[in-house]
Image: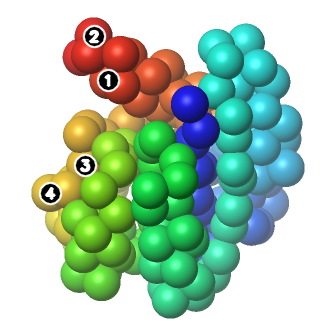
């Protein structure tokens, strides 16, 4: 199977951006972790980041009919974007919503998610480790185990 691991706005700054909230691991470190984990579990990984809503939508459309699953950390677009939600519905591939931080322990506006409505499940609060947790979760979902 092939997964698209897609990262939204400001996640390019990981490692230096509010490290007390998001940790010191960079997005490049996370990509390395995901690729290594993919090799362990037999999943090919496409890893992308964009600060632009339309580019994220294009990436989701690009996965349609070609890849088997989507792991999406949509950043702040999680809480605002009907367009991203619709893109996931249209892509017809299972998606996991991911956040480094526990969004439910933070401001009220982060408790709302348009992505969760169309996701298989949500992983948040486990920092960078959430990415490999999401890969395992998506793989077991595809295998019909959860
Ligand atoms: C985030 C949480 C969002 O609320 C925030 O806007 C981000 C990062 C996370 O990974 O914890 O940009 O998605």
In contact (CB < 8 Å): disc 3 and disc 4: yes
**Which residue is identified by label 1?**
141
User: What's the mark number on residue 145?
Assistant: 2
Q: Is mark 2 within 8 Å of ligand 1?
A: no
Q: Classify residue 110 by image quadrant.
A: bottom left
Label 4 – label 2 distance at C-alpha: 21 Å
Query: In the rendered image, is residue 90 in sight?
Result: yes
Q: Residues within 10 Å of mark 4 (few under 14, many from 20)?
A: few
Disc 4 and disc 2 in contact, CB within 8 angstroms? no
Q: Nearer the viewer, mark 2 or mark 3?
A: 2
The residue sitting at 23% across, 65% down in the picture is 89
Q: Which residue is mark 4?
A: 117
In the rendered view, tell whether residue 19 sits above or below residue 63.
above
Q: Earlier in the sequence, mark 2 or mark 3?
A: 3
Q: Secondary structure at mark 1?
A: helix
Question: Which residue lies at the image location 26% right of the left edge and 38% below the top edge?
Answer: 121
Q: Nearer the viewer, mark 1 or mark 3?
A: 1
Looking at marks 4 and 2 on the same chain, the residue that comes earlier in the sequence is marked by: 4
Q: Give the Cα separation between the discs numbered 2 and 1.
A: 6 Å
Mark 3 CB lies closer than 8 A to ligand 1: no
Farthest-out residue, left = 117
Whichever of callouts 1 and 3 sits on the residue coming sooner in the sequence is 3
Viewer-proximal residue, 55 or 111? 55
Image position of 33 (left or right of 117): right
The percent coordinates of residue 54 (x first, y second) are: 50, 89
Instruction: Look at the image and tell me in which quarter the N terminus lies.
Output: top right
The C terminus: image quadrant: top left
Give the quadrant of residue 64. Answer: bottom left
User: Please, is residue 67 above or below residue 18 in the view?
Assistant: above
Give the residue pinned by disc 3.
Answer: 119
């Amino acid at each position: 199977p092939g997964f698209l691991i897609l990262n939204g706005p400001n996640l390019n700054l990981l490692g230096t951006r509010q490290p007390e909230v998001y940790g010191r691991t960079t997005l490049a470190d996370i990509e390395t972790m995901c690729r290594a984990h993919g090799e362990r579990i037999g999943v090919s990984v496409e890893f992308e980041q964009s600060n632009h809503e339309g580019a994220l939508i294009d990436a989701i459309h690009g996965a349609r009919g070609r890849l088997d699953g989507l792991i999406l950390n949509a950043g702040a677009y999680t809480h605002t974007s009907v367009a991203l939600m619709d893109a996931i519905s249209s892509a017809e591939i299972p998606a996991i919503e991911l956040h480094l931080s526990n969004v439910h322990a933070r401001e009220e506006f982060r408790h709302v998610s348009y992505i969760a409505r169309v996701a298989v499940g949500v992983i948040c609060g486990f920092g960078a480790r959430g990415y490999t947790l999401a890969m395992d979760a998506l793989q077991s979902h595809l295998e019909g185990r959860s």
